Image (cartoon, rainbow, N blue to C red):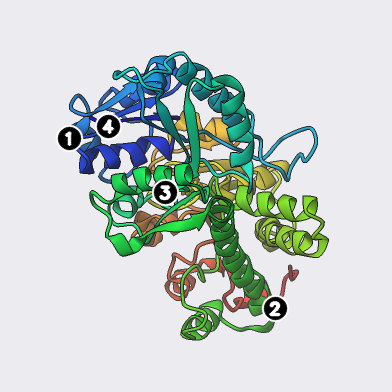
Amino acid sequence: MVKICCIGAGYVGGPAMAVLALKCPAIEVAVVDVSRSRIDAWNSDRLPVLEPGLDAVVRACRGRNLSFSADVDRHVADADIVFVSVNTPTKASGIGAGRAPDLAYWESAARVVASAAASSSRSRSGTKKSTVVVEKSAVPVRTAEAMERILVAHGGEERAFEVVSNPEFFSEGTAVRDLLCPDRVLIGGRDTDAGRSAVRAVRDVYAHWVPEDRILSTTSLWSAELSKVAANAFLAQRVSSVNAISALCEATGADVSDVARAVGGDGRVGDGFLSAGVGFGGPSLQRDVLCLAYACERSGVAEAAEYWRQVVAVNEYQKSRFVRRVVSSMFGTVAGKKVAVLGLAFKKGVGDTRGSPAVDVCRGLLGDGARVTVYDPMVSEKQARKGVAARVQVARDAYEAAQGAHGLCVLTEWDEFRALDYRRVFDGMQRPAFVFDGRNVVDAGKLREMGFVVYAVGKPLDDWLSKGTRN
């Protein structure tokens, strides 16, 4: 039986290995992590990752050929293939702070692989054992080279290592579906006999369920590493592009939905990621854009670095512009006023608030003196307070959040926010009652008929707003 070990039981490693175990019943899969509380959660009925369909996949495999363990060294030593799927956030301090990825967890994992594997250098037949190490984390281009140096330094002549890159492209909220039916599986390795053999080993795993034409395994190691951050950077660039257009639409009376529909109808462009909003979020897009910008900067391509930095700059502008619109519309101040925020997750279908624009909007409103009450169907009170601020109030439902509020901000596109009884919401709010729609969820026309003053991103401004301060 082939043995696979994945270091990192987070948002990528857990779901990816669960689906792999489901589709490859003859392969033994172990997911390991130094966080015992996280491992305990994976072994419980309440998984640490919220993904539709994931519970069923884990239940079908756990105890059969899928295990979650804090015994990292043992499972790494036994594995034929080791996936490294640890967090690589943007550095908060030091050289490259705010731009470069923090590879501390990644390097620690590399050293664990090297040390544990070297301690079990002989296979059961007595011959030198070879281990394929798979980069699953989002890393800068040529990171595999550093991984190889660490492995060789620890392994010496006793154990052979081969590093391949297999970046993950699934989206939070649709992870299981994306993993079961991926658009593509990318595998890059060295152009050597050992490198090609390692790529084939990983390809053979995916071939259990992924059609051959969707497995791209002729890519070089460096191209595979760069493709991950480039893909996310392109997606972020599209969001920032349409959000920049949304500001112009508001200033000219155009409708961003009409513009996006016209642009997206061009086959050369396509209609994906052209929905205007309060900004992109999540743990990956901004991190990977900044990673790409930093790589350009270090490679002497300053103009390209500045281009990618502007993608992030426009995203920050969109969030601050939204806060300024709220403040300017409500007579230039929100000090002491209750503002209800519907939605804290960075998108619907997930409970993840990492990088969420809603969090930044809340902080901006709090900074201007507002009393902020939040409600999100998938974000706990503890998580909300930790992500935003201890002084934020957390409501049990949207109606409680809106009760007595001067303004209502819709910041996550949950379906329940489309179906709210807005007459009930209106009756419980202060006058004038403001709705600031950061996701174009509400029917602005109907709400205006009820008496709301409505702002929707990229949409023509109503009379109240058009007479106020433009942002």
Instruction: Give the alpha-carbon distance from disc 4 to disc 3, as whole Å.
Output: 29 Å
Q: Secondary structure at mark 2?
A: helix
Residue 411: percent from left, percent from top:
52, 54
How many circles with numbers are drawn on the protein? Answer: 4
Q: On the rendered image, what quadrant is the N terminus found in? A: top left
Front residue of 74/93: it is: 74
Which residue is denoted by mark 1 in the rendering? 60
Q: Secondary structure at mark 4?
A: loop
In the rendered view, tell whether residue 435 sits above or below residue 149.
Answer: below
Task: Please identify, in this view, whether the residue under mark 4 or under mark 3 is nearer the observer.
Answer: 4
Horizontal side, residue 316 vs residue 461: left or right: right
Tell me the residue at 17%/35% (across/down).
Answer: 60
- Nearer mark to the viewer, of 3 and 1: 1
Give the spatial CA distance, label 3 vs label 1.
21 Å
**Numbered mark located on residue 426 in the image:** none
* Mark pair 3, 2: CA separation: 34 Å
Kindly indicate whether the residue at mark 2 contacts the one at mark 4 (C-beta within 8 angstroms): no
Evaluate if marks 4 and 3 touch, with contact meaning CB atoms under 8 Å apart. no
Report x, y in % for residue 380: 43, 33
Mark sitting earlier along the chain (2/1): 1
Q: Earlier in the sequence, mark 4 or mark 1?
A: 4
The crowd level at tag 4 (other Cα within 10 Å; few <14, some 14-19, many 20+) is few
Question: Alpha-carbon neighbours of circle 1 within 10 Å: few (<14), some, or many (≥20)?
Answer: some
Front residue of 207/229: it is 207
Tag of residue 172: 3
The residue type indicated by label 4 comes to Val
Mark closer to the chain start, 4 or 2: 4
Residue closer to the observer: 320 or 37: 37
Q: Quadrant of residue 250?
A: bottom right
Q: Which residue is mark 4?
A: 2
Report the mark closest to the observer, 2 or 1.
1
